[in-house]
Image: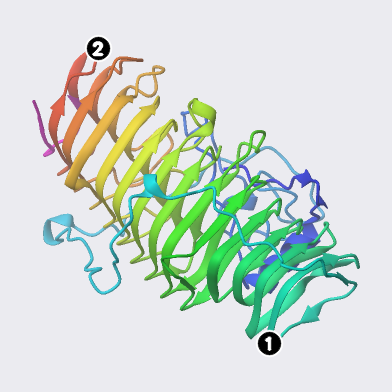
Amino acid sequence: MNTELRSGRQGNLTLSQLVLALALVAGAASCSPSNYDTEVDASARARPACRDGIDNDGDGRIDYPADPGCSSKNDNSEDTDNPPSAPAPDAASPDAASPDAASTTTTSPDAASTTTTSTDAASVDTTRMPVPPQSSTVINVTSPITISGTVTDVTYNVTGSMPNSTAISLGSTGRLERVRVNVNGNAMNGVGGGTLKDVYVTGATYAGIASTRRFEGVVFATNNYVDFYLSGSGVTLPADAMIKSSNLINFSFLAQNLADSKFDGPIVSLAAAGAPPAATAFECWGSCQRNLFNIIISNKAPGYGLAIYGTSSVDNVVNEFLGNGNAGTGDSDPGISIGAGATRNVIHKATVKRYTVGVVFGEDVDPSPYGNFVHTLIVEDAYWGCVFMDRGAYNNVVGDVGGTTCTNTGGVDDTHWSSVWIANRPGQTNVPPHDNQVLGLAQSGQLDYPRYAAYLGSGTTRNTVSGTATFWTIAKVLDQGSGNNVNLQ
């Protein structure tokens, strides 16, 4: 996914500012998973030095944006003295550490202690907005301020230049209620920490809202590089509250170093027309652990709808994800992407419409994801495919509760030739996908017929695909692996 710096009404975000922003709100940050490009041949989609996960210049900083020697994620040199060059070949090594699945039982994590009953995502009123300040009081902020008590019914107007600071810091005890914060491109972060109720933040050069401990009412952010930076332990969003983002510049919601937090209220991303191709609704990138997200809604985000990435992104539960791709046309990224070693994450129900792919396990970042579940999956109009399992994905399960419904999926070109794809893509040297399950498949459609309903590539083994399929041009199944169990009526 393209995360190159962009300019908006808030002005340009410089590399030094971004590095410091990540240090302030996240400690250390990694770049986002790369785009699920239109060039399907992964050997041609090589990984440059600034997103290869390696400290190439030995300065203790890895990849863009953490390494100041990287001008973008596509820069092939972390050294400030060397100019960018052509991307280097992907040097991913085989996933030799993949356990023998014959001795592994694929069991959904017990989330009974954290799971709440999900409201139907389609019934969420996404038009809700914060209650505005009940007074006309405007406070000009000329330098960073710290609030330890409660402030209500004011508008903060950031006028002083504080490019490396948070304009309003709340710590653990500060609280804003019915407050608007206009950052005007003058501060790195708008509001940090504390409790927010009915708050509106706009115009920060990095995070509009960073590391808030509790959200109440409706909290809204727009026109920030990252609207909500979610981090910390024990963060809460009650069921009657909502956090909402619009006018995507890069991320609506970016979660890092977030643990044991409970978001019972809906998380809503509404992208406006003209959002850049990389604009992502919700992404867990590293150190997301044991969090409950009741409802996540993504509407017209050109980038990922939901991404869960990193070996330390484990045991998260999403009760319901509802993703509707960009402006009624095929989107540039998958609706859901789970990769880079993400483990034991559970999505109870996912509805994905008008993305290139419904859900992909693996994609462009090692190591292989494993042990993840999407209990019920509904995918419509995903012209590259419904379910992809590549980059050595193993022990992942789709459809074990409510089935896997794929309508008008796959077949737009010669390299996306199936609704269900279980195989490494060219250039991926991992052990081929194994011990995955796609269950309750109901595959049908009327547009862009794929060559096969299900394709299992060379070297795949012990994968299961079962259900019904009525939508193909050559054959129902092409199984080039061994020991796979495919039963499609």
- Residue 1: mark in rendering: none
Q: Residue furthest top?
A: 473
- Residue 149: mark in rendering: 1
Q: Nearer the viewer, residue 334 or 320?
A: 320
Please identify the quarter of the rendering in which residue 184 is found.
bottom right
Count neighbours of disc 2 (C-alpha within 10 A) and say few if under 14, some if 14 to 19, many if 20 or more: some
Q: Residue 79's x, y, as percent? A: 75, 56
Q: Residue 357's x, y, as percent? A: 40, 34
Q: Nearer the viewer, residue 485 or 317?
A: 317
Q: Which residues are magenta?
A: 478-489
Element type where label 1 sits in the image = loop
Q: Nearer the viewer, residue 432 or 223?
A: 223
| Amino acid of disc 1 | Gly
Would you say residue 446 is visible in this rendering?
A: yes
The CA span between labels 1 and 2 is: 66 Å
Instruction: Single out the mark in the foreground, 1 or 2.
Output: 1
Q: Is residue 85 magenta?
A: no
Please identify the quarter of the rendering in which residue 152 is found.
bottom right
Residue occupied by mark 2? 473
Q: Is residue 486 magenta?
A: yes
